Every structure is written in C-alpha cells, then in structure tokens.
Image (cartoon, rainbow, N blue to C red):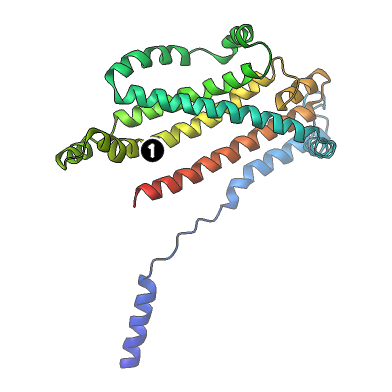
Amino acid sequence: MSISTTGVLTRARTAARPRPNRRRPSLRRWISPVVLVAAWQLASATAVLPPEKLSSPWTVLTSAADLVRTGELGDAFVVSLGRVGAGFAFGTLAGLLLGVLAGLSRWGEALVDPPVQMLRTLPFLGLIPLFILWFGIGEETKIVLVALGVAFPLYLNVHSGIRTADARLVEAARALGFTRGERLWHVILPGAVPQTLVGLRQSLGLAWLALIVGETVNADAGLGYLITNAREFLRTDVVVVGLVVYAILGLVTDALVRLLERRALRWLAR
C-alpha cells in the first residue's frame, strides 16, 4: 500500500512541475511560400512568365551567387547598412527627445506636436527635390530621409506611451512621497517602454522603405543603386536579388527588436 502511495505521489509531483513552454516553428507556415516559388518556377519554365518580365527563381539564385562571388552584393550591402544605421541613430534620437518633451510638458506638446504632425503627413518622394537643393546628391539626403522615416512613428509611440501612463500608479507614487523626477524615472518612463518598442519596430520598417526611395534617386552605390542599374539593363534577376536582400534585412532587424522587447519587458516585470 505504501509503495503504491509513494508511486502516486511521485507521479503527482512530476505532473505538477511546470513544463517549459517551447514553441516549435510550425511547418505549415512554409507551405504557401514553397507553393508560390514552385508556381513561379513552373511559370518561368513553361514560358508563361517571360524572363524580361520576371526571371525564374533558379536564375535569381545563380545571379545572387555571382554577385556574392564578385563582391558586388557585399559592397552594396555595406553601403546601405551604413546609411540606414546613421539615419536610424539620428531619427531615434530625434523621435525620443521630441516624444519625451511633448509627452511630459503641455507647453512642449503645444509647441512640438503641430509641426511634427504636419511634417509626418508629407510623402518622402515630395521631399526629395527639396533635400537635394539643401544637401545636394550626396549621403546627407539619404540619411535625412531614413531619419525622418524613423523619427515620426517613434515620436508618436513615445508621446502616447507617456500620456497614457497608469494614473493609479502615478498617484500611488505621489502618495509614497516620490518626487516628480522619481515618478518620471520609476513609473512614467518604464510604463512607456512597451509602446516605445512597438514604435521602434515600426521605425525600422520605414527606415528600409525610406532607404529604398533614397537609393533609387541619385545614388552611385548601395542596394538601391544595384537595383536601378539592373533595371536599365532589364536584369530582373538582379532586381529581385536586391529586393530579397532588403526583405531579409528588414526581417532580421525586426527580429532583433523583438528579442530586445522580450528582454526589456521581462526586466521590467521583475
């Protein structure tokens, strides 16, 4: 009887232990991409999709290998990464500073928010001629375009995150004798972190979009220049290679921000 009871208790303890929640990637998510690539290859092989309209996946793959071997793709990658890195740094700094200023002060909101809201509605393509007149056709125009793409969504999320801070937590901190600076540092800014990270993810997506726009206008290096040059010679395979690299860079940077988001939220929850 005791042996049976011991066995039951052992199994109960084992069942009560929390099991790690490991989410394995589902293979079902690969079905539609594989089917699309297979249909693309079939359409190219049967001449339904002519190569001057869109090269086959195999041609795109071999062209990517050739560009990597010659170093042309690597050089363009480094140039584009430097531009988006510089623009992202300036845009992040501007978005954070303006968002905090407008979120913490009503005078700051009154002075900062109207011009930011007006500027963010302007399309990138409409600003390019003006930026060329101001900064020329060098790197400055492309970096400023990326910085604007980063700053606006980050500003909106930082401003909203600060303004929507939990009033009960702020009141509790005030009742505990926290100063204004302590309430800001320990309650308001940590509460705005989740929405700020959402804005950071949005900003990264727009950073690559702004880079594409900037590099296809008056560029002599980078992925955008590679795509534009290939378009002139009807090299749709190289165009697709450049677009795929843009997409991969966007996915990788988004994954890095999501990793940062998980770590930051876990740290705040302690």
- Residue 90 drawn above or below residue 18: above
From the image, tell me which residue sits under label 1.
Answer: 193
Residue 205 in the image, given as x and y percentages of width and height: 55, 30
Dot 1 crowding, Cα within 10 Å, few <14, some 14–19, many 20+: some
Residue 55 in the image, given as x and y percentages of width and height: 80, 30
- Residue 256 drawn above or below residue 16: above
Say left or right for 134 vs 72: left
Residue 39: name its quadrant. Answer: top right
Question: Which residue is rendered at x = 69% and y = 30% of the image?
Answer: 243
Say left or right for 246 vs 165: right
Say left or right for 108 vs 126: left
Q: Secondary structure at mark 1?
A: helix
Quadrant location, the N terminus: bottom left
Looking at the image, which is closer to me, 256 or 6?
256
Question: Which residue is rendered at x = 37% and y = 85% of the image?
Answer: 7
Query: What amino acid is found at the position of numbered circle 1 in the picture?
Result: Val
Looking at the image, which is closer to me, 246 or 56?
246
Residue 70 in the image, given as x and y percentages of width and height: 85, 36
Residue 110: name its quadrant. Answer: top left
